[in-house]
Each structure stands twice: as C-alpha cells, then as structure tokens.
Image (cartoon, grey):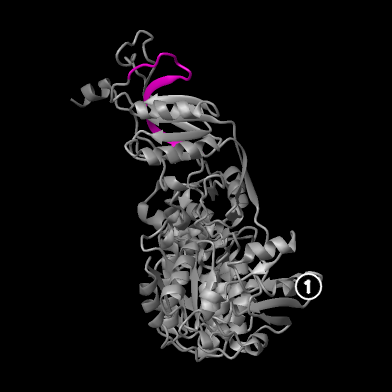
Amino acid sequence: MERLAFVCSCEDTMAPDLGVIGRGCPGVEIRGAEQLCRAQLDRFQAALADERPITVACTQESAVFSQEAEGRAIDFVNIREAAGWAREGAAASPKMAALLAAAAVPMPATKLVALKSEGVCLVLGRDASALEAARQLMATLDITVLLTGEEPVEPGRENPFPVLRGRARAATGWLGGFEVVVDGFSAPAPSSRTALSWGTGRDGAKSACDIILDLSGRPPLFSAHETREGYLRAEPSDPLAVMRAVFAASGLVGSFDKPRFVDFEPALCAHSRNKRVGCSRCLDVCPTGAITAAKDAVSIAAEICAGCGACAAVCPTGAAQYALPPAQAVAGRVRAALTAFRAAGGEHPVLLLHAGHGDALIDALARHGDGLPARVIPLRVNEEAQIDLSILASALAWGAAGLRVLAPGRRGHGLEGALRNIDTLNAIAEGLGLGSRAAMIETDDPFTMAEALEATLPLRADWQPDAGLALGAPREVALRALRALHATTGGAAMVPLPALAGFGAAQVATDGCTLCLACTMVCPTGAFRANPDTPELSFLEDACVQCGLCVATCPEKVISLEPRLNFAPQASQPQVVKAEEPAACTRCGKLFGTRASVARVKDKLRASGHWMFSSPERLAVLDLCEDCRAVVATTGGMDPYAGPERPNTTTTEDYLRRR
C-alpha cells in the first residue's frame, strides 16, 4: 500500500525539495506544508480518513499529531535538526528522503520478560540515615535494615521493622529475586540503651528480598550496578541522592515488563565441548554478569541483561542476536536510507549511527552551529554497543563512503565489541584497497562531533553499490556483503584479520595428525568434517568462527588458528586436509583405522620391547579388527593376562646352600 508523507518546512526555516524527496521515495506520496502543526493541521486531519500509512516529518509536535490521530499509529521522523537546519540545508533533500525511507521500514515487536516484586526490601546502611530511609518506606514496603555496625546508632523507641547487623559480602539476582550473603550477622540486644549493642556474629547468612536499597557507602554489590533492576544505591552523605533512591524504591512493587534484549540459541553456541573451553567472547564483554558458563553453551539471564548488545556484537556464530531491534531490521533501515539517498541524487553518503546520546548533540549542533553536513545520514539505534559486523559491512557494500559510530565521551558498558568490529571492517577495507572507512566518535561536545564528521567528507564511494538484501544470520549477512564488496572493488584475495575477528582458517600440521577426528566431534559449526567412508579430514573455511575448540581438543596439538578472510572460491567448499589409506583386517577384510596409525603403533611397541608383543605373531594381532582380535585371543592360545616367564623363588635354604 502506498504511504503518505507530510514534509513541513517548519515556517520556511528550511527548504525541502519535494521533487527530490519524491524521487528518493518511490511509492510514497509527498505532501508539503509550512505550518502543519498549527495553521495547516486540517491537512493532516483530512489525511486521517485515508487508510494509507502516514509519516510526519516532525518529531517536535508528535504529541499534537498523535492526539489528532486518536490511537492510529503514525511514524515520525526528524528532518529539521537532522537535515534542514544546517549550513548545507539547501542541499539536504536527498538526506531527507533517506530519513523518510528509513523510518518507513517496520520494526518487529519486542519480546518481554516479566518481573514480579512483592515489596520485600533490604536496606543496607551504616548509620541513622538508613533507619530514616526505612521509616519513609515502611508504609509501602516490607522493610529489613542491615547495618554494618561500624558507627553507633541510637535505638528507636519502637521497632516497626527488624534492624540487624551484618556486611553484605555478595549478592545475586534481580528485581523480585535477590539473594544476599551476609557476614557478621547478628541481632541487637533488647537492652541496648545509648547505642545498639550486637550479639555474636556469624558468617554466611543468606537473605532473600525483592529490592535492595544500598546506603552502606561500601563498593557496589554488582558490576554495572546502575543497570541492575531493583538494586538502588546512593551515598549516605548525599541527602538528595538518598531521597531519589527512596522514591524509586517506593514504586518497585507489583509486576513489571522489561524487554528481552537478546535472543539466544544454545545449540549454536561455541563456548565449550567435553569440558574444553573454546569461545568466551560474550563472557569477556558482558558488563553486568548476565552471562555465565553452562555445560556446552553459555547462559544469558534475561532478568539481569541491561541490553547493551555487546554479546550479540561479538558472537561469531549468531547464537546471541540482539532483539531491540534485530541486526537484520537495523540493516534494513540502513539499506533503505542509502538507496533513497542515491535515488534522490545524493552521492558518497556517510552513515552516522547513534543511540539516545546522539540526539542531544545533533539538536545542539543544528540550533547553535552549522548542523550536520548534507552527506551525513544519522540513524538511531538502541545502543552503540549492539553494532555488529553485519551492519557495518552491509552499509559499506550498499554504498556508504564512510561509517561513524557516535558514543559518549565517557566510554559506556560493552563498547569493546563495537570497537572490535570497526577494527575488523577497517582491516578488510584496507585489504581491498579502500583504506580505513569506519571509526567511533567518543564525545559529549557537538562541535567536536562536527569536526570529526567534517573529516569524513573527502571519502568517496567509487564502487558499484550492492543491491542484495540483509537475509539470514548476522554472520551470513556480513560474509555476503564483504564478498559483494570484494567482487566490485577487487583487492587482495586473502586479508589478514585481527584476533577474535570470527573469520579464519584452522591450520593443521598434517605430519603430526593421526586422523583421530577429535576436532570433528567438537567443532560447533561443522568446519572440520569427517568422511564416513574413508579416513579423511576436510575443512570448510567459511564455517570457521575461530572458537578454538579444535585447538583445545586436538591430542597431538597440531592445530593452530589463523584469523583471515579468504575471498577465494575454495573457502566456500570443503577442502581435504589429510587422507590416508584405511587398514583392512587381515582375517575378515573389515576396514578399521589407517595403515599409518597401525604402523606407528607397531613401531612404538617394537621399540619398547614390551613382552606382550615381543614376537611377530603377537604384533600381527594389531592387523586385526576389534572383533577378530577377540576371536584370536580366545581360540588361538593367546592369553592376554599371561606375563613373561618368572624366575624361581629364592628361599633362605637356597642362600645357605650357595654359601
């Protein structure tokens, strides 16, 4: 169904070219206005009778339009601060088309995780401020106060809630399901007079609660504690911070829904096999402790996950995929924006990916500076840390001359993964002769951001943009985009990559390989494969995620990893690594093992002089399959328990006789 889009010049403070925008957005009816939210609101009201989807190129007055729409879904997009309010605003119509096209791409619904709190609150404190906070909360929450005992606290006239002593050593859980381990736990003496006096403490006590209000002034109980639902912390010396924490705690009763930020498929996880650890990329970058090692895969606690998306950005197999929105949906918006920009006559676009932090900087630059360059297309994502290689690689293949990720000046949680993906993309781009194309701008200053974006303007996208869609898992999307980029730009057929890039080869020193095929049994992606009909090991490079399970498992230690991206056709086809002639049983002809391995075992036993294989007849048993060996051992007079001939026992009488 054709879409209807209203493009308002905001009282002629910008000059959108409706014809240019229309060329960039085929299938969309573009209607102009000068004051759509006030004098020309009737145009919008009349359009509501139309069943077509509606996009309004204004976010400032979205409340006005939503009220008029009376529950009907309307898409809003900012073309004013992002495009029109700029020194190059007159040339920004292709960018306006790009922003409208991106906003029209639907986003999938987000799954939710249910949290339930009964209002049981544990207040951790060191002085009377904790008791005062507890008194303010006692009307709405079930309160228990745990004081450290390091400062004297005068007992109250009455005890409306338990007051105990102890130091919280560790805590696990989330809103509605915390467990706190307490050392030095004790109760006060009822006869406490000027200050609470405590009994003998014990270590290892446990307390279950729904909410933790930490006013102890001690180090936080959780990493990235500000993201842990239900854990509220304030310095007891800061009354305003304490009051904010108390106010927040008072509302944490009932049922709550939080987004399920990450979809996880354990069967694809390459963490471990047979107690051998391989990939730990997500464990290394998760700032909240939401990811823990399980048996063969990791486990992601959706109740703890704060949604930074770092795990999905570095997962090489696609076991962890970001869901708010998925990388495929983000890539869809990127493709729509770049396609519309090019169709509207724009050239050499630079893509600026940003989260909520970027909105304020873009607005400030538009209001107090020169605004964004006409070639810079800003696209909003949920978190900067969620940006994986598939998004970056696809944008480059679709014709982006440059890529910039805008992040706060104080580096946030989990950005290591996005930085790693930027490094990987730059390594590939340089291998293709394109030079460095991606970077992260870490700043809180709009003018510093502007300077960094101005530096991207010399970049040119002189290659033919790819027209493919972003279909499949992120790894498949990234690999397809990179191959399309290689096909149109040329460049090296083999590009070395930084460690942990997720692409590469597993090199096998074939002289030491015994074809035990242990690597094939632990490889989570099927990169190493066995031939069921003959002793043969093959390797599919496109499937290798550099998890290292084969290296950790190989008993001969002859496998090593080489991070690289191989554009040769052979990388997408299994290549035989080693093959040997099978050994045939000399009695029944059954194939078992390899001739080389049987010969090696014979040589070792012959050299060791072991009594059990001291004769050619006994060594010949090794040429038999497992069934025939049992037959020969039982019918051929071979006693597997027999040992070498033992000497006669020498007695005391023998010694005396020799004397």
Disc 1 designates what residue? Answer: 46
Check disc 1 and give the amino acid type: Ala
Q: Quadrant of residue 238?
A: top left
Task: Please provide the residue range marked out in magenta.
Answer: 154-173
Q: Quadrant of residue 261?
A: bottom right
Residue 436 image point, x, y percent: 40, 81
326 to 304, vertically: above or below: below
230 to 59, vertically: above or below: above
* Helix, strand or loop under label 1: helix
Q: Residue at x 55, y 38 (%)?
A: 251
Q: Residue at x 70, y 66 (%)?
A: 74
279 to 480, vertically: above or below: above
Among all residues in the image, which is located at the extreme left?
659
Residue 358 visible to the viewer: yes
> In the rendered structure, does residue 315 fall within the stretch colored magenta?
no
Residue 91 image point, x, y percent: 53, 88
Looking at this view, is 153 or 308 the one in front? 153
Residue 188 image point, x, y percent: 37, 14
Residue 516 visible to the viewer: no
